[in-house]
Image: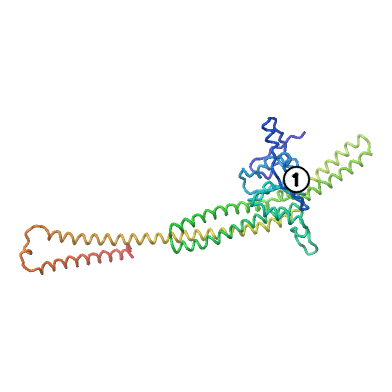
Amino acid sequence: MRSPMKAPADDPRHRPAAATTAPPHSAAGRRKGTTSRPWLVVSDSGRSCLEEVGKHSIMRRTGLPARDLRILDPLLSYPSTILGRERAIVVNLEHIKAIITATEVLIPNSRDPMAAPFVRDLQSRDSSPSGAPHQASESSVKVLPFEFRVLEICLESVCRCLEAETLTLEQEAYPALDELTSKISTLNLEHVRHLKSRLVDISGRVQKVRDELEHLLDDDMDMAEMCLTEKLAHQHSGECLSGVEVDNGASQLEEDRDEVFKDETDSSHGSLAAFKPNIQELEMLLEAYFVQIDGTLNKLSHLKEYVDDTEDYINIMLDEKQNQLLQTGVMITTATVVVTAGIVVVSIFGMNIGISLFDVPTFSQFWETTFGTIGSCIVLYVLAIGLGMRSGLLQ
């Protein structure tokens, strides 16, 4: 028996698809292994049914290992991922969680309200061939394989959802930012803060989907793994060819039959290893939605730039207000110093000391002294302000 290969833990896309985990022997393990959950199964003919299926049944049905099924667990947090395996495609994009095979698609969260539009689109498009997504050429119209049609519905649903959230955010953010520039208040600042948090969250989600599509487009091997229908057809043709070759070899001698069968088996394996599916259709499909999700990310980038520009503008306004307050403080401090000088003069004249000026019976000297002191204070204040403006400290 061939021992299972040990796959690297850094990238789940290049892990082996065969599951070799043995069922647990304890009673608790048996109960855990036999726990089933509802899965919505939609066939390529459009018929759908809700089945209670366990994890091990799904593994045997799709050929997926347990670690790939954990990606679809709603209790665990996994980034946006599209994995191509030998017999299935695992899709985990936002609210879309599905296992796609060449003949059916299994959805674990069909009762989720966010996944309801995706389920309706899947059932309606698969029920009528005319409504199935296709690619047109000059000569004829070619219908995409089932797994590509389902994958297109998944990508369309995710892109539509993210585009709607982006549009809603734009409609709320731009007026709020304009209002904040005209009136800086605590309420407006709090509103913009919430909008910025939503912007960061949506941008991160869109970026993850875009990175996943970009990774698939850059890796031809991953795209080849997702051509399930073509691989299945090639596998069936290889089995038929091997059966014919074995029947022809049965008429030969016993000692020659083993040698011929060995050579034919080696050549058959070589042909399967050299088999390269046509990934052009899948590449065009992924490129179309990559452009769409990249456009959504560009909108969010422009909105982020607008938020950053608004923050810079508000900081400039606050700095200007702070400069005005500082200038007002300098002017008030200067006036205080000048008035204090006048108070010193008045205090000197108010002291109980003998001065010849007090011996004059008229008040003309009093008014001259009073007006002289006030005038001197005004002159000193004007000189101080003029010196500050000349040096650039005041405007």
Where's residue 150, x and y in %? 72, 53
Relative to residue 363, is residue 204 drawn left or right? right
Vertical side of 189 occupied by 266: above or below:
above
Q: Mark 1 points at which residue?
A: 87
54 and 333: which is toward the camera: 54
Judged from the image, the secondary structure of the residue bearing numbered disc 1 is loop
Above or below: residue 66 compared with residue 209: above
Residue at position x 32%, y 61% from top?
327
Could you tell me how many numbered marks the image carries? 1
Residue 285 vs residue 204: left or right? right
Quarter the N terminus occupies: top right
The residue shown at (61%, 51%) is 208
Q: Residue 197 appears at what percent x and percent y?
A: 52, 53
Q: How far from the left and from the top, in percent, is residue 51?
A: 73, 44
Q: Nearer the viewer, residue 58 or 278?
A: 58
The foreground one among 333 and 36 is 36
Q: Which quarter of the image is occupied by the C terminus?
A: bottom left
Q: Is the residue 41 above or below the residue 289 in the image? A: above
Query: Residue furthest toward the top?
Result: 26
Label 1: how many residues lie within 10 Å, few (<14), some (14-19) or many (20+)? many
Indicate left or right for 361 with 134 as reference: left
Q: What residue type is labelled 1?
A: Arg
User: On the image, which quarter does residue 29 sit in?
Assistant: top right
Q: Which colour scheme is used?
A: rainbow
